[in-house]
Structure formats: C-alpha cells, structure tokens
Image (cartoon, helix red, strand yellow):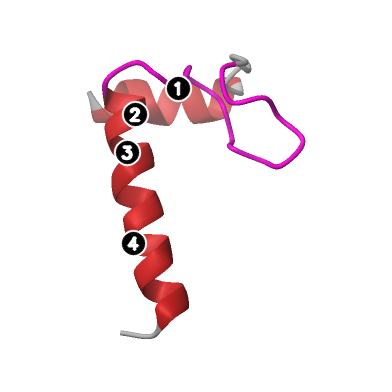
Amino acid sequence: MPKKQADMAIKLKGNGYKSWAGMIPLGNTGGANVPLRKPLPIPDDLQQIIDAAH
C-alpha cells in the first residue's frame, strides 16, 4: 500500500475511535479551518439519514 493510503488508513482508524469515544463532537467536519472540539450543526437532511440508519 502506498504511503499516502497507509497514512489515511491510520488517520481514519484513530479519528473513528475518537468520534466513537466522544472526543470529537458530532457534526465536526475535521476541516483545517474548524477547531477539533467545536461542535457543528448537522444539516436536517443528513440528520434524517442518520436517524433512519439507527
């Protein structure tokens, strides 16, 4: 696996755990211009999809 793909796999695994453990607030996109611990609103259309999946 190329280095970029390996780095992304590690990042996804780590961030997935942090999200599950409540260390990253819901709605946070993880963008460069968004603080890690800042909660962001989830758009209504996406919230409906999430609710339907649970």
Q: Amino acid at mark 2?
A: Lys
Classify mark 3: residues with Cα within 10 Å, few (<14), some (14-19) or many (20+): few
**Contact (CB < 8 A) between labels 1 and 4?**
no
Q: Count the labels in the image.
A: 4
Span of residues in magenta = 21-37
Mark 1 and mark 3: span between their CA atoms? Answer: 9 Å
Mark 2 and mark 1: span between their CA atoms? Answer: 6 Å
**Contact (CB < 8 A) between labels 2 and 1?**
yes
Residue at 54% from the left image edge and 23% from the top image edge: 27
Q: Which residue is mark 1?
A: 24
Q: Amino acid at mark 4?
A: Ala
Q: Which residue is mark 2?
A: 18
**Contact (CB < 8 A) between labels 3 and 2?**
yes
Mark number displayed over residue 7: none
Q: Amino acid at mark 1?
A: Ile
Point out residue 2 in the picture as x, y percentages from the top left corner. 39, 85
Q: Which residue is mark 3?
A: 16
Classify mark 4: residues with Cα within 10 Å, few (<14), some (14-19) or many (20+): few
Q: Work out whether residue 47 or residue 27 is closer to the camera in this orientation and state it.
A: 27
Point out residue 26 in the picture as x, y percentages from the top left corner. 47, 19
Point out residue 16 in the picture as x, y percentages from the top left corner. 32, 38
Instruction: Specify whether 50 is left or right of 29.
Output: left
Q: Amino acid at mark 3?
A: Gly
Residue at 27% from the left image edge and 20% from the top image edge: 21
